[in-house]
Amino acid sequence: MTDQAFEQANTCAQQCLAKGPVATHAEYDPSRRRLIIALSNGLELGIAPDLVEGLADTSPMALAQIEISPSGLGLHFPELDTDVYIPALLEGILGSPRWMAQRMRDMGKKGGQAKTEAKTKAAQENSKRGGRPRKLAL
């Protein structure tokens, strides 16, 4: 790492620390299956680990081992070798862009498979009109 890169990283870290809250305490609550993060501004964040990349489908024992970074901006799960960036969590970023895109596709797929009365009625109405319109070739 160059001196310039080091200085940029330090500047960025100082801005993050000045801008927002940091983690003061973190624990896993197995009864609610939630990761609970206490922040320096008095707020508590509770999040299902299955929503966070690297924490999904893991054992409660692995989730219970949490280390807060010295800056308070990150959480480290040593047994999983996974890190979570608190400012990203607060912005709703729960993983890499690729991972989040896959989660969105999976959610859309599940929604499309849902069987509801409204969906059944809409399909019946569409079939009366000849079904789904054909795509036109360009």
Image (cartoon, rainbow, N blue to C red):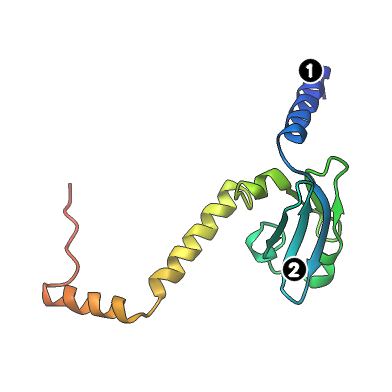
The x and y percentages for residue 67 are 87, 53
Q: Mark 1 points at which residue?
A: 4
Question: What is the three-letter code of the residue carrying label 2?
Answer: Thr
* Residue at the farthest top position: 4
Q: Which of marks 1 and 2 is nearer the N terminus?
A: 1
Q: Where is residue 16 in the image (x, y as percent from the top left)?
A: 73, 34
**With 103 as the anchor, is 125 left or right in this view?**
left
Measure the C-alpha gap from mark 1 to mark 2.
Answer: 39 Å
Which of the pair 18/121 is nearer the observer? 18
70 in relation to 30, above or below: above
In the image, taking residue 9 as reference, residue 50 lies left or right, namely left
* Place of residue 28 in the rendered image (x, y in percent of width and height, measured from the top left): 79, 66
- Above or below, comparing residue 17 to residue 38 in the picture: above
> Circle 2 is placed at which residue position?
58
Residue 135, relative to residue 11: is it above or below? below
Q: Is mark 1 on a helix, strand or loop?
A: helix
Front one among 136 and 94: 94
Q: What's the residue at 77%, 74% (across, down)? A: 30
**Residue 120, disc:** none
Quarter residue 19 falls in: top right
Foreground pick, 45 / 122: 45
x, y percentage for residue 102?
Answer: 53, 57
Q: Residue at x 82, y 62 (%)?
A: 27
Number of other residues with Cα within 10 Å of mark 1, as a class: few under 14, some 14 to 19, many 20 or more: few
Q: In the rendered view, would you say 12 is above or below 94?
A: above
- Which residue occupies the foreground of this view, 56 or 16? 16
Tag 1: amino acid: Gln
Task: Residue at 40%, 76% (x, y): give it.
Answer: 114
**Would you call the spot at circle 2 few (<14 residues within 10 Å), some (14-19), or many (20 or more)?**
few
SS of the residue under disc 2:
loop
Residue contact between numbered discs 1 and 2, judged by CB atoms under 8 Å: no
